[in-house]
Image (spheres, rainbow, N blue to C red):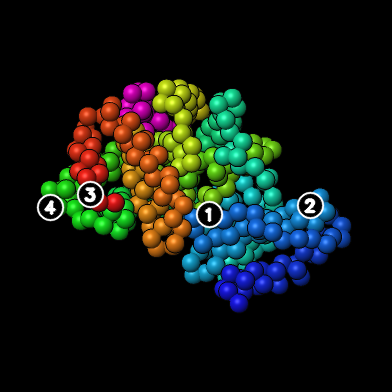
Amino acid sequence: MPDEDVRLKLLENWLEPLLPALFAKQGWGAVPAATLTPASSDASFRRYFRWQGGARTLIVMDAPPPLEDCRPFVKVAQLLAEARLNVPQILAADLERGFLLLNDLGRQTYLDVINEDNADALFVDAMQALLAFQQLPMTTPLPSYDDALLRRELQLFPEWYVQRHLEVEFTPAQQAAWQRVSQLLIDSALAQPKVLVHRDYMPRNLMLSEPNPGVLDFQDAVYGPVTYDITCLFKDAFLSWPEARVRSWLEQYWQQAREAGVPVQPLLEDFLRASDLMGVQRHLKVIGIFARICHRDGKPKYLGDVPRFFSYIEAVLARRPELAELGELLVSLQRAPA
């Protein structure tokens, strides 16, 4: 029997005896006959199942130790709930075995429904939710987006995309250029005001829900650069928007953040530059991650979105001459065999 089927059986055996007490506690009556079907999966080793009994649905997370750890999810869920965000309520947990039972925030992500006509309204809600958790006091112990973390993320690009995917090694000159570019991006990130950072605040992790949006996949939250999440929201892995529209949304967020007391850069142009450089750091990281998911985890589909991230980077290179060295490096890599 495959390992994943063993996990599913363990999950079912955990779930069955706890449901009667949960239903009684919630005042839901008797436990109905139910089905358990895949709800979604992501680029990690986590899996999600939807328990459905009659009109009632619940979500079950399977996060197999030692590959995944439920504790950060539980910790950050409690933190975001303090900001009145619509995050999954944890109804039952077995942290040692990696099982969580959650309420169901809905079946449609922003990615499922967003289009040119409804994007403004959906992003208004997403920005309000983002501003709510960016106003949380940074008192809960969480990691910081420090030099070491930023550098580890950037290193995914040469390690997995250049060396493993392109099968080339940096020349000494390319390596020196990469170090200078990395330092520029890291210095920019560390100079920014700090807030709580979701780290993957994008349409696939926002649910069309009431209140809107439901927020998912926040377990990797850290304290870090204020532009990170808003840049992530509009420069997504799976859909792209015209540059002029993105700038308009960024300006809208910047104005609202200032009014809410979120510590954004005082000058709009400084904020936009910080957002551009923060985006480049993330784009390079994600390109490396997608190459790693392909070559290490056997999931090649994510490589199909790599050109999107190079397009984001190219748009920034066109308006940020301080990144000219990165542009030259990427051109030199294009000449390498893929």
Query: Could you give the CA–CA distance between mark 4 and mark 2, rounded to whole angstroms?
Result: 60 Å
Q: Earlier in the sequence, mark 1 or mark 3?
A: 1
Give the residue pinned by disc 1: 42
- Residues under labels 1 and 3: Cα distance? 31 Å
Amino acid marked by disc 2: Arg
Disc number lying in front (1 or 3): 3
Residue with the mark numbered 4: 172
Q: Earlier in the sequence, mark 4 or mark 3?
A: 4
Instruction: Give the residue furthest to the front.
Output: 337
Q: Give the number of marks.
A: 4
> Looking at the picture, which amino acid does disc 4 mark?
Pro
Kind of residue sitting beneath label 3: Ala
Residue 56 got which mark? 2
Left or right of residue 47: residue 139: left
Please tell me which residue lies in front, 10 or 273. Answer: 10
For label 3, the residue is 336
Q: Which residues are magenta?
A: 262-275
